[in-house]
Amino acid sequence: MTDVASLSVPDRLRLGLRFDADAIAAEIAEVSPASWIPHFNKVIHEGEWSGVTLRGPGGDAGRIYPDPTGTQPVADTPVLDGCPIVAKAIASLQCPVLIARFLSLGPGSVLHPHSDEGLGFDAGTVRLHVPVVSDPEVTFELGGSPVTMALGECWYLDLRKPHSASNGSGRQRVHLVLDCRVDQWLTAVFAQALTAIDKEG
Protein backbone atom coordinates (compact mmCIF):
# COMPACT_ATOMS: atom_id res chain seq x y z
CA MET A 1 0.00 0.00 0.00
CA THR A 2 1.30 3.43 -0.94
CA ASP A 3 1.51 5.99 1.85
CA VAL A 4 0.40 9.55 1.06
CA ALA A 5 3.37 10.99 2.94
CA SER A 6 5.79 8.96 0.83
CA LEU A 7 4.77 10.61 -2.44
CA SER A 8 6.39 13.77 -3.75
CA VAL A 9 3.72 15.15 -6.05
CA PRO A 10 4.50 18.02 -8.48
CA ASP A 11 2.15 20.96 -8.93
CA ARG A 12 0.73 19.37 -12.10
CA LEU A 13 0.32 15.70 -12.91
CA ARG A 14 -1.50 13.91 -15.71
CA LEU A 15 -3.21 10.91 -14.19
CA GLY A 16 -3.79 7.61 -15.94
CA LEU A 17 -7.54 8.19 -16.06
CA ARG A 18 -9.20 8.79 -19.43
CA PHE A 19 -12.64 10.17 -20.26
CA ASP A 20 -14.62 10.14 -23.52
CA ALA A 21 -14.59 13.87 -24.27
CA ASP A 22 -16.75 13.63 -27.40
CA ALA A 23 -19.47 11.65 -25.64
CA ILE A 24 -19.45 13.99 -22.64
CA ALA A 25 -19.54 17.02 -24.94
CA ALA A 26 -22.69 15.59 -26.55
CA GLU A 27 -24.29 15.36 -23.11
CA ILE A 28 -23.25 18.93 -22.31
CA ALA A 29 -25.03 20.09 -25.44
CA GLU A 30 -28.27 18.64 -24.05
CA VAL A 31 -28.02 20.43 -20.69
CA SER A 32 -30.65 23.15 -20.41
CA PRO A 33 -29.22 26.69 -20.66
CA ALA A 34 -31.19 27.50 -17.50
CA SER A 35 -29.06 25.00 -15.56
CA TRP A 36 -25.89 27.05 -16.05
CA ILE A 37 -25.24 29.27 -13.03
CA PRO A 38 -22.96 32.35 -13.28
CA HIS A 39 -19.92 31.86 -11.09
CA PHE A 40 -20.23 33.59 -7.73
CA ASN A 41 -16.68 35.01 -7.75
CA LYS A 42 -17.03 37.97 -10.10
CA VAL A 43 -13.79 39.62 -8.98
CA ILE A 44 -11.38 37.21 -10.62
CA HIS A 45 -12.90 36.93 -14.09
CA GLU A 46 -13.96 38.99 -17.08
CA GLY A 47 -16.63 37.73 -19.42
CA GLU A 48 -18.67 34.57 -18.99
CA TRP A 49 -17.77 31.98 -16.36
CA SER A 50 -20.53 29.60 -15.35
CA GLY A 51 -21.11 26.13 -14.02
CA VAL A 52 -23.48 23.20 -13.64
CA THR A 53 -23.28 20.96 -10.59
CA LEU A 54 -23.63 17.23 -11.26
CA ARG A 55 -22.82 15.96 -7.78
CA GLY A 56 -22.44 18.10 -4.71
CA PRO A 57 -23.64 19.19 -1.27
CA GLY A 58 -27.29 18.36 -0.78
CA GLY A 59 -27.65 17.34 -4.43
CA ASP A 60 -28.36 20.99 -5.24
CA ALA A 61 -27.76 21.67 -8.95
CA GLY A 62 -27.93 25.41 -8.33
CA ARG A 63 -24.98 25.39 -5.96
CA ILE A 64 -21.73 25.40 -7.91
CA TYR A 65 -19.36 25.80 -4.98
CA PRO A 66 -18.11 23.15 -2.52
CA ASP A 67 -19.28 22.90 1.07
CA PRO A 68 -16.59 24.70 3.11
CA THR A 69 -17.76 22.98 6.30
CA GLY A 70 -17.69 19.49 4.84
CA THR A 71 -20.83 18.63 6.82
CA GLN A 72 -23.52 18.45 4.14
CA PRO A 73 -24.19 15.04 2.60
CA VAL A 74 -23.07 14.73 -1.01
CA ALA A 75 -25.58 13.54 -3.61
CA ASP A 76 -26.12 13.47 -7.35
CA THR A 77 -28.15 16.35 -8.78
CA PRO A 78 -31.08 16.02 -11.22
CA VAL A 79 -28.81 17.29 -14.02
CA LEU A 80 -26.72 14.13 -13.74
CA ASP A 81 -29.80 12.05 -14.61
CA GLY A 82 -29.50 13.37 -18.15
CA CYS A 83 -25.77 12.65 -18.35
CA PRO A 84 -25.40 8.86 -18.05
CA ILE A 85 -21.90 8.80 -19.52
CA VAL A 86 -20.68 11.37 -17.01
CA ALA A 87 -22.50 9.49 -14.24
CA LYS A 88 -20.65 6.31 -15.18
CA ALA A 89 -17.35 8.18 -15.29
CA ILE A 90 -17.89 9.65 -11.82
CA ALA A 91 -18.92 6.25 -10.47
CA SER A 92 -15.67 4.77 -11.80
CA LEU A 93 -13.70 6.92 -9.36
CA GLN A 94 -13.24 4.72 -6.30
CA CYS A 95 -12.65 7.67 -3.99
CA PRO A 96 -15.04 10.15 -2.36
CA VAL A 97 -16.18 12.71 -4.96
CA LEU A 98 -17.14 15.82 -3.00
CA ILE A 99 -18.39 17.87 -5.94
CA ALA A 100 -18.50 17.34 -9.71
CA ARG A 101 -19.21 20.23 -12.05
CA PHE A 102 -19.06 21.41 -15.60
CA LEU A 103 -17.27 24.76 -15.60
CA SER A 104 -17.51 26.88 -18.73
CA LEU A 105 -15.32 29.81 -19.76
CA GLY A 106 -16.99 31.74 -22.55
CA PRO A 107 -15.41 33.04 -25.76
CA GLY A 108 -13.06 35.94 -25.08
CA SER A 109 -13.32 35.43 -21.32
CA VAL A 110 -10.43 35.53 -18.85
CA LEU A 111 -9.78 34.11 -15.38
CA HIS A 112 -7.27 36.33 -13.62
CA PRO A 113 -4.53 34.82 -11.43
CA HIS A 114 -5.98 33.53 -8.19
CA SER A 115 -5.41 30.74 -5.67
CA ASP A 116 -7.73 28.17 -4.08
CA GLU A 117 -6.75 27.29 -0.54
CA GLY A 118 -6.94 23.72 0.74
CA LEU A 119 -6.74 22.05 -2.67
CA GLY A 120 -3.58 19.99 -2.79
CA PHE A 121 -2.60 16.35 -2.62
CA ASP A 122 -0.88 16.70 0.74
CA ALA A 123 -3.89 18.70 2.04
CA GLY A 124 -6.13 15.68 1.50
CA THR A 125 -8.43 17.18 -1.16
CA VAL A 126 -7.57 17.47 -4.84
CA ARG A 127 -9.24 19.17 -7.77
CA LEU A 128 -9.06 17.24 -11.03
CA HIS A 129 -9.63 18.87 -14.42
CA VAL A 130 -10.86 17.00 -17.49
CA PRO A 131 -10.99 19.17 -20.65
CA VAL A 132 -14.13 18.28 -22.59
CA VAL A 133 -14.65 21.19 -25.00
CA SER A 134 -11.68 23.38 -25.83
CA ASP A 135 -9.64 25.06 -28.56
CA PRO A 136 -5.95 25.71 -29.31
CA GLU A 137 -6.61 29.36 -28.42
CA VAL A 138 -7.43 28.42 -24.83
CA THR A 139 -4.54 28.77 -22.38
CA PHE A 140 -4.08 27.76 -18.75
CA GLU A 141 -1.20 28.79 -16.50
CA LEU A 142 -0.23 27.45 -13.09
CA GLY A 143 2.49 29.09 -11.05
CA GLY A 144 3.38 31.26 -14.05
CA SER A 145 3.98 28.43 -16.52
CA PRO A 146 1.56 26.92 -19.05
CA VAL A 147 -0.23 23.61 -18.62
CA THR A 148 -1.26 21.91 -21.85
CA MET A 149 -4.20 19.57 -21.27
CA ALA A 150 -5.65 17.49 -24.09
CA LEU A 151 -9.32 16.58 -24.39
CA GLY A 152 -10.29 13.65 -22.20
CA GLU A 153 -7.14 13.73 -20.10
CA CYS A 154 -7.42 13.97 -16.31
CA TRP A 155 -5.07 16.42 -14.62
CA TYR A 156 -4.25 17.12 -11.01
CA LEU A 157 -3.34 20.76 -10.45
CA ASP A 158 -2.11 22.22 -7.18
CA LEU A 159 -4.45 25.19 -7.23
CA ARG A 160 -3.01 26.66 -4.06
CA LYS A 161 -0.56 28.18 -6.54
CA PRO A 162 -1.69 31.19 -8.59
CA HIS A 163 -3.43 30.03 -11.74
CA SER A 164 -5.23 31.70 -14.62
CA ALA A 165 -6.99 30.89 -17.88
CA SER A 166 -7.84 32.69 -21.08
CA ASN A 167 -10.23 31.71 -23.85
CA GLY A 168 -9.10 33.50 -26.98
CA SER A 169 -11.30 31.35 -29.19
CA GLY A 170 -14.83 31.80 -30.45
CA ARG A 171 -16.28 28.82 -28.57
CA GLN A 172 -16.97 27.75 -25.01
CA ARG A 173 -14.24 26.04 -23.02
CA VAL A 174 -15.79 23.43 -20.75
CA HIS A 175 -14.01 21.26 -18.19
CA LEU A 176 -15.41 18.49 -16.04
CA VAL A 177 -14.05 19.49 -12.62
CA LEU A 178 -13.95 17.02 -9.74
CA ASP A 179 -13.06 17.68 -6.13
CA CYS A 180 -12.01 14.39 -4.55
CA ARG A 181 -10.90 13.23 -1.13
CA VAL A 182 -7.48 11.60 -1.17
CA ASP A 183 -7.79 7.96 -0.08
CA GLN A 184 -5.79 4.80 -0.68
CA TRP A 185 -7.25 4.25 -4.15
CA LEU A 186 -6.52 7.79 -5.34
CA THR A 187 -3.06 7.65 -3.78
CA ALA A 188 -2.36 4.56 -5.89
CA VAL A 189 -3.55 6.41 -9.01
CA PHE A 190 -1.09 9.22 -8.25
CA ALA A 191 1.70 6.73 -7.56
CA GLN A 192 1.09 5.05 -10.93
CA ALA A 193 1.21 8.42 -12.71
CA LEU A 194 4.50 9.27 -11.03
CA THR A 195 5.93 5.86 -11.97
CA ALA A 196 4.94 6.49 -15.59
CA ILE A 197 6.87 9.79 -15.56
CA ASP A 198 9.95 8.03 -14.17
CA LYS A 199 9.78 5.42 -16.93
CA GLU A 200 9.39 8.09 -19.61
CA GLY A 201 12.40 9.94 -18.19
Image: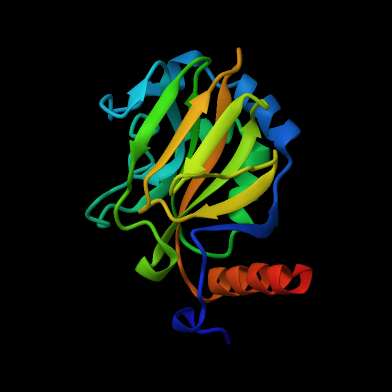
> Is the residue 28 above or below the residue 89 in the image?
above
Q: What residue appears at the point 64 percent right and 59 percent down from the top-left corner?
A: 15
> Is the residue 171 above or below the residue 129 in the image?
above
Q: In which quarter of the image is the C terminus?
A: bottom right
Q: Farthest front residue?
A: 144
Q: Position of residue 193 (x, y in %)?
A: 66, 67
Towards the viewer: 141 or 5: 141
Q: Position of residue 173 (x, y in %)?
A: 57, 26
Q: Quadrant of the N terminus?
A: bottom right
Q: In this view, does 117 lie to the left or right of 188?
A: left
Q: Farthest right residue?
A: 200
Towards the viewer: 112 or 31: 112
> Is the residue 96 above or below the residue 30 in the image?
below
Towards the viewer: 4 or 67: 4
Q: Where is residue 41 in the image (x, y as percent from the top left)?
A: 28, 30
Q: Position of residue 62 (x, y in %)?
A: 35, 29
Residue 134 is at least partly visible in this image: yes
Q: What residue appears at the point 43 percent right and 49 percent down from the top-left corner?
A: 143
- How many callouts does the rendering have? 0
Residue 64 is at least partly visible in this image: no
Identify the colour scheme used: rainbow
> Is the residue 23 above or below the residue 201 in the image?
above
Q: What residue appears at the point 37 percent right and 56 percent down from the top-left corner?
A: 119
Q: Farthest left residue?
A: 69
